[in-house]
Image (tube, helix red, strand yellow):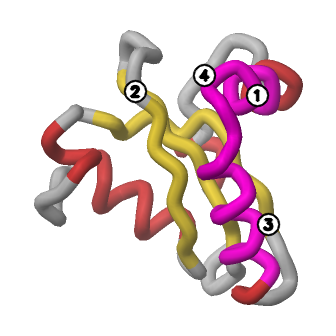
């Protein structure tokens, strides 16, 4: 799974905050969020539960998808997560 472009959604534990990001190494990037390695939005709002991700063949398509998802309203984002992960379980362990 390493070095594959993907877009992902993280959630806070209470599901009040969502974060959309892009990476080419999902396990490493989520680990960074979980361990608060980088200061920023996810660190400040304690957002580290991986609830959704999409793998793509090229970084360009991932970036386009990220931009699209960021324009969506909250209900659309929740619907996307609910379709793929109805319990909103943390998918991080499934990456290994």
**Are the residues at dot 2 and dot 1 in contact (C-beta closer than 8 Å)?**
no
Residue interval drawn in magenta: 61-80
- Image point (78%, 57%), residue name: 54
Write down the residue under mark 4. Answer: 89
> Mark 1 to mark 3: distance in Å?
19 Å
Q: Give the percent coordinates (x, y) of residue 83.
A: 87, 24
- Image point (51%, 60%), residue name: 21
> Mark 2 to mark 1: distance in Å?
14 Å
> Mark 2 to mark 4: distance in Å?
15 Å
**Are the residues at dot 3 and dot 4 in contact (C-beta closer than 8 Å)?**
no
The answer to whether residue 38 is left or right of residue 82 is left
Q: Is residue 14 magenta?
A: no
Quadrant occupied by the C terminus: bottom right
Which mark's residue is nearer the viewer, 2 or 4? Answer: 2
Write down the residue under mark 1. Answer: 76
| Disc on the earlier residue, 1 or 4 | 1
| Disc on the earlier residue, 3 or 4 | 3
Q: Quadrant of residue 6?
A: bottom right
> Mark 2 to mark 3: distance in Å?
22 Å
Q: Classify mark 3: residues with Cα within 10 Å, few (<14), some (14-19) or many (20+).
A: some
Residue closer to the observer: 61 or 72: 72
């Amino acid at each position: 799974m390493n070095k594959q472009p993907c877009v992902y959604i993280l959630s806070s534990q209470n599901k009040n905050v969502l974060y959309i990001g892009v990476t080419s190494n999902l396990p490493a990037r989520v680990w960074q969020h979980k361990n608060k390695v980088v200061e920023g939005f996810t660190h400040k709002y304690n957002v580290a539960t991986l609830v959704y991700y999409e793998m793509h063949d090229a970084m360009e398509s991932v970036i386009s998808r990220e931009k699209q998802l960021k324009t969506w309203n909250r209900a659309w984002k929740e619907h996307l997560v609910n379709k793929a992960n109805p319990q909103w379980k943390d998918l991080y362990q499934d990456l290994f």
